[in-house]
């Protein structure tokens, strides 16, 4: 009887998560951080990853002579868990900021604040999750910090980590939004449901996002 109940639980969990199978962030998973989601379209990043993106067709990126990276936010403000503690969340945002500065400084001087001729990058971490491997797809609920520690009859499964971002790019002089992007990625796999997720588990994802943002900027600049 217990085995049947466990099987039903696992099947139910799998079905509940099936709506998140897309490589793209689904509309119901948007956090509300961006002003306008209706303009987003399915695109591929320079590295070939799935993203939801919009770029103002009239933006002249050559007019930007410097870039200001706003401190990345956790949006909306989450409640840390034993699986994903506050130190992990803080570490993720701090590393994201540094990754963005490292990449964009290759193309533009870093500004101390917004202003005329300044490209403002406004990033947010909108989901951080850890879900049991084998329960496909990832359990991604906007900024709800989830530890889906469901065991199977054969033992504890590995844990997969997932993280999502939303970012707006603004004209620092007018405050006008000139681009938006929404995407998610997989972090380092955890050994079991007892292991705590650390900021370093998301570094590769954050580095990839920052690199793609820079390459997108450079591509747009070369086209104009």
Image: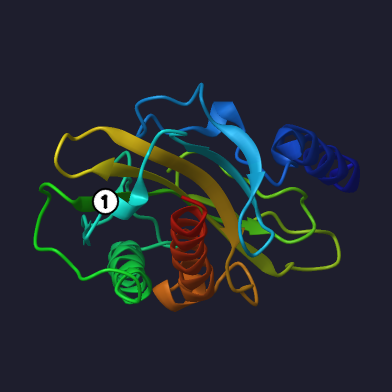
Give the residue pinned by disc 1. Answer: 63
Drawn side of residue 37 relative to residue 189, left or right: left
Q: Position of residue 215 (x, y in %)?
A: 50, 64
**Residue at position x 69%, y 54% in the image:** 150
Drawn side of residue 155 relative to residue 190, left or right: right
| Residue 197 shows in this picture | no
The total number of labels drawn is: 1
Q: Quadrant of residue 95?
A: bottom left
**Above or below, comparing residue 120 to residue 90 in the picture:** above
| Residue 126 shows in this picture | yes
**Above or below, comparing residue 110 to residue 120 in the picture:** below
| Quadrant the N terminus occupies | top right
Q: How is the structure coloured here?
A: rainbow
**Above or below, comparing residue 16 to residue 203 in the picture:** above
Drawn side of residue 39 relative to residue 149, left or right: left
**Residue at position x 28%, y 64% in the image:** 90
Q: Position of residue 152 (x, y in %)?
A: 80, 58
Q: Nearer the viewer, residue 115 or 207?
A: 115
Q: Quadrant of residue 134?
A: bottom right
Number of other residues with Cα within 10 Å of mark 1, as a class: few under 14, some 14 to 19, many 20 or more: few
Q: Position of residue 43 (x, y in %)?
A: 65, 43
| Extreme residue toward the front, this view | 224
Q: Position of residue 151 (x, y in %)?
A: 73, 59
Q: Give the structural element (helix, strand or loop) at label 1.
A: helix
**Residue at position x 46%, y 62% in the image:** 218
**Residue at position x 34%, y 54% in the image:** 80
| Extreme residue toward the top, this view | 38
């Amino acid at each position: 009887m217990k085995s049947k109940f466990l099987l039903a639980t696992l099947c139910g969990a799998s079905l509940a998560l099936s709506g998140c199978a897309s490589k793209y962030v689904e509309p119901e998973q948007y956090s509300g951080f961006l002003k306008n989601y209706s303009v987003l379209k399915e695109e591929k990043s320079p590295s070939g990853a799935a993203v939801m993106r919009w770029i103002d067709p009239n933006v002249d990126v050559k007019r930007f002579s410097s870039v200001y990276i706003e401190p990345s936010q956790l949006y909306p403000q989450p409640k840390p868990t034993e699986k994903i503690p506050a130190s992990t969340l803080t570490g993720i945002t701090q590393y994201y900021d540094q990754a963005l500065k490292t990449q964009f400084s290759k193309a533009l001087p870093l500004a101390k604040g917004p202003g005329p001729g300044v490209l403002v990058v406004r990033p947010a971490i909108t989901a951080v999750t850890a879900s049991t491997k084998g329960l496909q797809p990832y359990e991604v609920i906007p900024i709800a910090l989830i530890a889906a520690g469901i065991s199977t009859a054969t033992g504890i499964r590995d844990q997969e980590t997932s993280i999502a971002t939303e970012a707006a790019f603004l004209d620092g002089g007018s405050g006008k939004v000139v681009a938006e992007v929404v995407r998610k990625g997989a972090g380092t796999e955890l050994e079991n449901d007892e292991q705590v997720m650390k900021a370093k588990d998301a570094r590769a994802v954050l580095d990839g996002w920052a690199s793609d943002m820079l390459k997108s900027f450079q591509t747009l600049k070369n086209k104009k």
